[in-house]
């Protein structure tokens, strides 16, 4: 499949929740989360400010916004997982991702979010590696997306990691940067 055959909105495809989740799938998702900080850093390495200011697709976020979004989104994910592990099916608060991507801090250097993702993912992976079978089945209720377990959230955010990484890497390949 060539780059022109890839849907730029969903370069790795849409997330599809499996009917059941095996321990191997959980381990694979944890590995993806562990690898993301280095892969994200490598994906933006050497890009100029102008390149970071380029949308990954027409009407899409800039690469800078994508990096900051990953940090924002994954901070929310970790909080939701911790709430799921410490409360009985809490209702979590959604947030307006598009509005967050327009806030002034989107002009911050991507390095700030790269450092945040590195530290956050180290702790997140450490937490996930410690869970027992019962803890994987705990969860939360999202007002828009419904109930989700810790294990499904982990697979979802592993996909989210690959999804946004591909936004950057596909644009780099397309533009030959």
Image: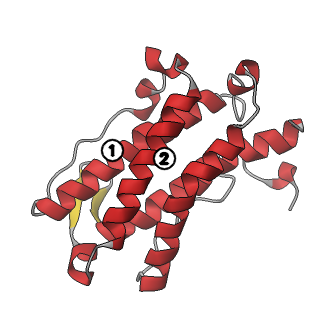
Inter-mark Cα distance, 1 to 2 = 15 Å
- Which residue is outermost to the left? 88
- Callout 1: 10 Å neighbours few (<14), some, many (20+)? some
Indicate the position of residue 59 as horizontal and vertical percent values. 66, 28
Mark 1 vs 2, N-terminal side: 1
The relative height of residue 24 versus residue 96 in the rendered view (above or below) is below
User: Which element is circle 2 on?
Assistant: helix
Q: In the displayed structure, does residue 20 sit left or right of residue 64?
A: left
Say which residue label 1 marks: 76
Q: Is residue 103 visible?
A: no
Q: In the displayed structure, does residue 1 sit left or right of residue 162?
A: right
User: Which element is circle 1 on?
Assistant: helix
Q: Depth check: 172 or 141 in front?
A: 172
| Residue at left offset 21%, top offset 48% | 92
Q: Depth check: 168 or 58 in front?
A: 168
Colouring scheme, one of rainbow, by chain, secondary structure, one colour: secondary structure
Indicate the position of residue 68 as horizontal and vertical percent values. 51, 32
- Callout 2: 10 Å neighbours few (<14), some, many (20+)? many
Q: Is residue 120 visible?
A: yes
């Amino acid at each position: 499949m060539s780059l022109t055959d890839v849907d730029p909105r969903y370069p790795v495809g849409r997330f599809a929740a499996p009917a059941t989740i095996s321990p191997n799938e959980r381990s694979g998702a944890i590995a993806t989360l562990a690898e993301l900080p280095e892969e994200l850093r490598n994906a933006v390495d050497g890009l100029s400010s102008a390149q970071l200011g380029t949308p990954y697709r027409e009407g899409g976020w800039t690469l800078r916004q994508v990096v900051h979004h990953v940090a924002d989104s994954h901070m929310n994910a970790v909080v939701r997982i911790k709430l799921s592990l410490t409360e009985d099916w809490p209702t979590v608060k959604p947030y307006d991702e598009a509005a967050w991507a327009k806030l002034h801090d989107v002009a911050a250097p991507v390095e700030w979010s790269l450092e945040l993702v590195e530290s956050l993912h180290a702790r997140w992976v450490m937490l996930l590696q410690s869970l027992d079978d019962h803890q994987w089945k705990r969860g939360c209720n999202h007002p828009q997306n419904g109930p989700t377990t810790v294990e499904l959230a982990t697979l979802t955010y592993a996909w989210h990691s690959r999804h946004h990484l591909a936004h950057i890497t596909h644009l780099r390949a397309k533009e030959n940067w």
